[in-house]
Image (cartoon, grey):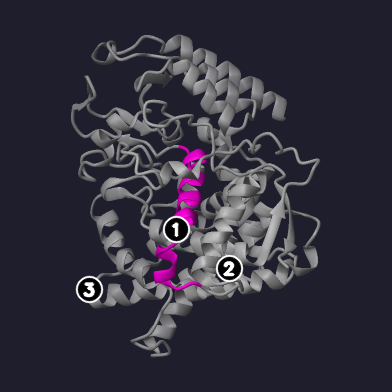
Amino acid sequence: MFSLLFFAAILVIIIYYVRYNKLPKDVENIPYFSALPVIWALLRNRPQDEIQDVIHESSKGHSIYLSKLGPQVNINITSPDHVKDILMESEDFAPKHQYNPGNVLYDFFGNGMVFSNGDKWRTYRKLANPAFNNALSPEIVGETVMNLFSFMQKNLDRPIDVFEVMQRITIEVLGELAFGYKFGCLESEETPHIINIYKFLISTVESVYRIVFPWINKLPTEHNRKFRQAIKEFDGFIFNIIETKRNEINNKKIADNGRVDLLTSMLKSSEQEGIHADTKQLRDEMVTFFVAGHDTTSMSLSTALYYLAKYPEMQEKARAEVINILGNEPVIPSSDQLKEMKYINAIIKESLRIFPPAPAINHRVLRKPTKIGPYIIPKDTLVSVNIWQVHYNKKHWENPKQYNPERFLNNEKRHPLSWVPFSSGPRNCIGQNFSLMEQRVILSMILLKYNWTLPKNSINQEKLVLESQFLLRPLDLKLVFSERK
């Protein structure tokens, strides 16, 4: 079955390419490069870094280029010099491309803030902004890290899957601060059932075949049946949390003052603002927060831990900074102490630069003819910013493939949009400060508790090997942690 789908996909691509190869007259002057090499790499399940090398080679260094598969024209931006032409404009100028029911992205994410536009986007962004500020709690993150130490205790001095461990702690932090819910990922090594459901869903959503050929999602296959059933079960879990929070608020079981989770804060704000917070829309927002606060933060932390294992001198420098600020015993840092951690912050920023967890920004649709760089891009064209290529642009980054946190400490003047792991402008990632705070707390406390190294037989000795998925994940990244004496 898989082989049949594979060859059918190749045939469809060739037919599309031949039939729609001619470019429209209004974009003939823009550098054009075939999408076939990239599609071929995707269909062969190559990891993201190899796919990005193909993109860089195909685009031949152009900061703006055109690609197309079938009738759809796509403009790709790979340079900070032109990022502002899209990201810094009004959210109505270039709204997000919206998917329809039947597409896996829509079926899973719905119309959350990542994909919604107009008044719906503005309404829920308004509700979420103060809610995220209220959820910034180093104390709760720190308490969860203490639970992580207990969880790791019996796995010290032997290789452990660090990405899997980082997923466990980030899901617990997310549950506590976003939903007021304990998943139990740090209570035993067994993965909770709902997390297994989520992993199945996100692996399906990230399937290259399903994104390139959305008609696959409508086939009467066993996988599609399981996907729809998993969506139903996951939705039931989210709906139950939302309904529980509504009842707690209505029954005055939640105090009007004090710290509350993200969902509770959004529900309370909606009441105060006279906004009807639709349950389905809240579900879509929660799913977005689930992915952004879990998978992407796990990747960034795993990247940092990997490079600190690969370069022990960086690990010692980071630890010395933390000891200087917090002392020599594992303690929970305060917000003010986190601000003092300049080298820790540089490590996190460099980890996000070299491996941006989401390597591209979802397509925008131009509402009018728009000047980007030297070109006038016609109305209704899809435009995408390739974060990976922006982060590896040699004009703005010296030795971009080298991991070097010092580049964020040397006061070097750099284009303000050369680092955009959280996007930028009015539609930047609303959870940026949440993620950065969480990473600082986790990394600083782990530095006080452990030393860690790469196993001698690691497949990641030379470079961090990635899985072949859109959201970045390391492949078999094992590290050996030992308690500091």
Residue nearer the viewer, 105 or 147: 147
Query: Does residue 314 appear left or right of residue 435 in this picture?
Result: right
Residue nearer the viewer, 13 or 393: 393
Q: Tag 2: residue type?
A: Glu
Q: Which mark is residue 436?
A: 1
Residue nearer the viewer, 399 or 393: 399
- Please state the extent of the stretch shown in magenta in the rendering: 333-359
In the image, which is nearer the foreground, mark 3 or mark 1?
1
Q: Is residue 103 magenta?
A: no
Q: Is residue 355 magenta?
A: yes
What residue lies at 47% left-to-right and 16% top-to-bottom?
58
Residue marked by disc 2: 172
What residue lies at 63% left-to-right and 38% top-to-bottom?
466
Q: Main secondary structure of the magenta part?
A: helix
In space, the residues marked 2 and 3 are separated at their CA atoms by 30 Å
Q: Find numbered disc 2 in the image and state the secondary structure of the residue it sits on.
A: helix
What residue lies at 81% left-to-right and 40% top-to-bottom?
457
Q: Find numbered disc 3 in the image and state the secondary structure of the residue it sits on.
A: helix
Dot 2 or dot 3, earlier in sequence: 2
Residue 119 in percent (x, y) is at: 23, 55
Residue marked by disc 3: 273
